[in-house]
Amino acid sequence: MKKELPIALSNRHIHLSQEHIDKLFGEGYELNKFKDLSQPGQYASQEKVDIVGPKGTLKGVRVLGPARGNTQAEISLSDGFKIGVVPPVRDSGDVEGSPGAKIIGPKGEVEIENGIIAALRHIHMHTDDAEKFDVKDKDRVKVRVPGDRGVTFENVLVRVSPSYALEMHVDVEEGNACGAKNGMSVELIK
Amino acid sequence: MKKELPIALSNRHIHLSQEHIDKLFGEGYELNKFKDLSQPGQYASQEKVDIVGPKGTLKGVRVLGPARGNTQAEISLSDGFKIGVVPPVRDSGDVEGSPGAKIIGPKGEVEIENGIIAALRHIHMHTDDAEKFDVKDKDRVKVRVPGDRGVTFENVLVRVSPSYALEMHVDVEEGNACGAKNGMSVELIK
């Protein structure tokens, strides 16, 4: 059986804690939904912030909602170069030792000590898909992307949850490196 | 035998015809060497130009020397998105049907009808290396890049010449997608 799934490119974005939303947008502020994302309950908000590093600024970085426990920005290695930080390639939430930055919103700014990462490429997978594909949460698999710029990605993290929808996420550089478009079909290889 | 070779990341750059050098920098202008590149005779010049597309500008794009028969810019897919063109992934010199742009230099500007491409990833190889690796000019091979962001690139073009030095060239997005650094050792797989 060919184990096929859709791929999607994640542009730079930031998750904010409610404490930081308050500081950046005003006390008690609530994010406004711009559009739903593929993962149930997750959405791109209308809000944007600037991320300032020692050498430059990423302007207008989209805030994703809902609010999270900790603030975390997911940027590309090129983004990091532009602002003068080296984001480690990490699973979401694993921010220990990662660089910080200044975050600027319309009503204030915050300095975060860490939280700037490059997202480890990963597959969101519903429990039923995991069974079908014969993989489990935290497995590392390979994924082949076909085409003129075809590649096989190693070390792709599998995340399994009954609240996930089947989709592989790569950042823009990874997506462009293999000529992927949102929704393109790729193949999981164990 | 493991077929190992070094990899290098090519940042966006432009090759100019002498006619266009004259128009952009002044009649009879000669490019000034900034530093030698790995391929014998090729160099990064001190000169830079702006590349203007329908939606934006890439400022300060490095000119590579010496002058070529035809002007050609090699940019990333993200660069293309920024300025509003879609560069096809092509071998150097294969610019038919590719988008054009306005090029602006300190003394003038030129409009090129085509020549904006994303470079097809490729290996420069001396004739002796080709013999050792058992490949020939225009072969397509696979290349594995090790590491946390390890990938296997398919469809890597082999170019063989007695005037080439052994090196794989990828663009910045391809390089970042696999966590490659200049000079890192990668493996050719037939």
Image (cartoon, coloured by chain):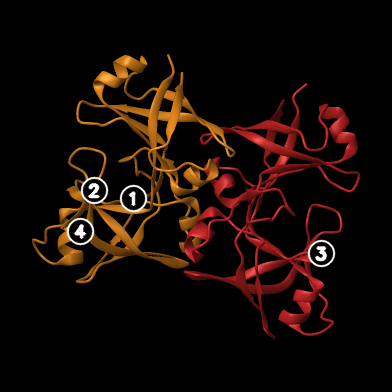
Chain colours: A red, B orange
Query: Residue type at mark 3?
Result: Gly
The chain to which mark 4 is attached is B
The residues bearing labels 3 and 1 have C-alpha atoms spaced at a distance of 48 Å
Q: Earlier in the sequence, mark 2 or mark 4?
A: 4
The residues bearing labels 1 and 2 have C-alpha atoms spaced at a distance of 8 Å
Q: Residues within 10 Å of mark 4 (few under 14, many from 20)?
A: many
- Label 1 sits on residue: B115
Query: Residue type at mark 1?
Result: Gly
The residues bearing labels 4 and 3 have C-alpha atoms spaced at a distance of 56 Å
- Label 2 sits on residue: B70
| Relative depth, front residue between B43 and B59 | B43
Query: Residue type at mark 4?
Result: His
Mark 4 residue element: helix
Mark 1 residue element: loop
Q: Residue at x 14, y 62 (%)?
A: B22
Contact? badges 2 and 3 (CB < 8 Å): no
In the picture as drawn, the residue positioned furthest to the front comes out as: A97
Q: Residues within 10 Å of mark 3 (few under 14, many from 20)?
A: few
The chain to which mark 2 is attached is B
Contact? badges 4 and 3 (CB < 8 Å): no
The residues bearing labels 2 and 3 have C-alpha atoms spaced at a distance of 55 Å
- Label 3 sits on residue: A69
What is the x, y in percent for residue A87?
58, 55
Q: Are marks 2 and 4 on the same chain?
A: yes
Mark 3 residue element: loop
What is the x, y in percent for residue B131?
30, 15
Q: Earlier in the sequence, mark 1 or mark 2?
A: 2
Q: Residue at x 86, y 58 (%)?
A: A41
The residues bearing labels 2 and 4 have C-alpha atoms spaced at a distance of 9 Å
- Label 4 sits on residue: B20
What is the x, y in percent for residue B30?
11, 58
